[in-house]
Image: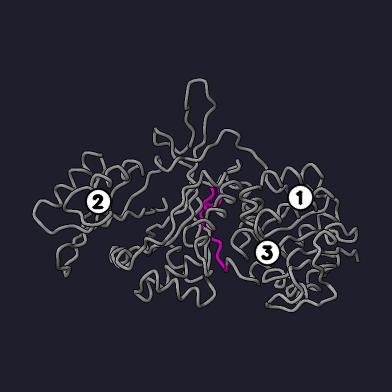
């Protein structure tokens, strides 16, 4: 049986998880693949660094270059995280023609095009299934399983930390800060949680999925991002009363043209090429309780994908953690080993650009429905003043709720708005926030209909 040797860079949580998975199911993989896969060397920061699964001292080294440069290492696995060193490691391996597997979403998001070009130049490949949603095989699904579909909609709950916090806020009727502390105590949130709760982790993932779904590489700076710090228990309760659950969603949508059609194409100038416009955003969203994504709770991830042929599909599972990520890395090991065996390194390239004339829709032009919560002085005429501003902006109001039982100098006032552009709503709320009867900055959360 042909032997394929792996060199791993990183022996911490995920690295030791991959080692453990191969110890557990390496023989099973070999029998399924018809070749033997084994770890030859693992580069670590320190031999005694804490890791959930033990690694034999004989396999470890602190010199990553000896792993990459070893002629007996056929596949390199990068699991160190970060950007600069990881980029150097991956480029060094690719330059030797060695296939590379990575779980590094931040690196792929920021430097994917450069790494893909290096793999192509040196006749090898880059595999990154584990970079998005852990054990959910969403990258393979988009690149292979759904290759015959135009992806019209993709909605992702792609950050387990945020989903845990929001789920617990709803179930326990607790505040954001309390649930963040609980998530940190449970190991679901970092001590410095900004990457997760401010939406940046989700931005990396949703940018990769948007690029694969629509055939042009989406730069991180093009993705509008809002995190969940501003979500309160009051928002949770009012949303629930209206039949909604608040989730942090990554949203990728082909946008209808100005005539209302579904072609998603328009002409920007008479001489220009037609442009396909794609919404790529990350923000808290009111999800109808009747939709399947509303029931995705705690640290679980889910990606809802609609193709023009297949219709609606759902991918669900654990999106992070040593074992879920190790499962995705093992999938890439299988693909890379088989590609080596059959001399087909470029059978499925890491990324194929095929929509040269597409663009990300600016957030100002994104159209959706809205939940707006105001804290207002309860005096006659307040509602009329607010409604006049919405009316002047041509923003329709579908319902107004002034909950009973709130007494004092100010009371909550809830508006559900019809479809409107983000720019129009933002300008209207700026005027409403300046009214003397409005006591706090307006809270605005988008509402998704999934149509």
Q: Residue at x 90, y 58 (%)?
A: 71
Residue 434 left/right relative to 165: left
Whether residue 202 is situated above or below residue 218 in the rendered picture: below
- Cα–Cα gap, marks 3 and 2: 44 Å
> Tag count in the figure?
3
Task: Kindly identify which numbered label has been placed on residue 328.
Answer: 3
Q: Nearer the viewer, mark 3 or mark 2?
A: 3
Residue 291 horizontal/vertical position (percent): 42, 61
Q: Residue at x 60, y 34 (%)?
A: 356
Quickly name the residue at label 1. 91
N-term-proximal mark, 1 vs 2: 1
- Cα–Cα gap, marks 3 and 1: 22 Å
Give the structural element (helix, strand or loop) at label 1: helix
Quickly name the residue at label 2. 398
Residue 27 horizontal/vertical position (percent): 81, 74
N-term-proximal mark, 3 vs 2: 3
Please state the extent of the stretch shown in magenta in the rendering: 304-318
Q: Residues at badges 3 and 1 in contact (C-beta under 8 Å)?
A: no
Tell me which corner region of the image, top left, top right, bottom left or bottom right, holds residue 17.
bottom right
- Cα–Cα gap, marks 1 and 2: 54 Å
């Amino acid at each position: 049986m042909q032997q394929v040797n792996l060199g791993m860079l990183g022996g911490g949580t995920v690295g030791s998880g991959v080692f453990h998975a191969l110890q557990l199911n390496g023989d099973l993989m070999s029998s399924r693949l018809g070749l033997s896969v084994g770890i030859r060397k693992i580069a670590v920061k320190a031999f005694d660094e804490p890791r959930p699964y033990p690694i034999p001292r004989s396999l470890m080294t602190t010199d990553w270059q000896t792993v990459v440069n070893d002629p007996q290492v056929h596949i390199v696995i990068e699991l160190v995280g970060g950007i600069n060193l990881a980029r150097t490691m991956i480029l060094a391996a690719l330059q030797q023609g060695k296939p590379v597997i990575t779980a590094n979403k931040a690196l792929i998001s920021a430097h994917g095009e450069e790494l893909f070009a290096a793999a192509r130049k040196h006749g090898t490949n880059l595999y990154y299934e584990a970079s998005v949603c852990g054990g959910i095989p969403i990258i393979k699904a988009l690149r292979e399983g759904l290759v015959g579909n135009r992806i019209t909609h993709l909605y992702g709950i792609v950050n387990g930390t945020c989903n845990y916090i929001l789920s617990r806020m709803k179930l326990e009727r607790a505040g954001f800060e309390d649930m963040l502390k609980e998530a940190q105590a449970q190991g679901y949130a970092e001590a410095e949680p900004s990457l997760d709760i401010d939406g940046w982790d989700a931005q990396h993932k949703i940018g990769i999925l948007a690029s694969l779904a629509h055939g042009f590489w989406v730069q991180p700076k093009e993705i509008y991002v809002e995190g969940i710090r501003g979500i309160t228990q009051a928002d949770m309760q009012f949303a629930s009363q209206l039949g909604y659950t608040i989730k942090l969603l990554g949203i990728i949508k082909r946008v209808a043209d100005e005539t209302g059609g579904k072609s998603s194409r328009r002409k920007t100038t008479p001489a220009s090429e037609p442009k396909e416009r794609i919404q790529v955003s990350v923000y808290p969203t009111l999800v109808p309780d009747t939709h399947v994504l509303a029931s995705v709770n705690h640290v679980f991830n889910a990606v809802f994908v609609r193709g023009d042929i297949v219709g609606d599909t759902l991918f669900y599972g654990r999106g992070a953690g040593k074992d879920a990520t190790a499962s995705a890395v093992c999938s890439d090991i299988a693909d890379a080993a088989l590609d080596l065996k059959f001399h087909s390194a470029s059978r499925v390239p890491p990324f194929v650009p095929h929509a040269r004339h597409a663009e990300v829709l600016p957030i100002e032009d994104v159209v959706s429905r809205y939940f707006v919560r105001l804290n207002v002085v309860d005096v006659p005429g307040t509602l009329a003043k607010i409604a006049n501003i919405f009316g002047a902006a041509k923003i329709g109001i579908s319902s107004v709720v002034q909950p009973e039982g709130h007494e004092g100098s100010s009371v909550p006032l809830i508006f559900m708005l019809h479809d409107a552009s983000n720019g129009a709503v933002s300008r209207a709320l700026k005027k409403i926030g300046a009214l003397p009867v409005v006591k706090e900055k307006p809270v605005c959360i988008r509402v998704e209909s999934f149509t």
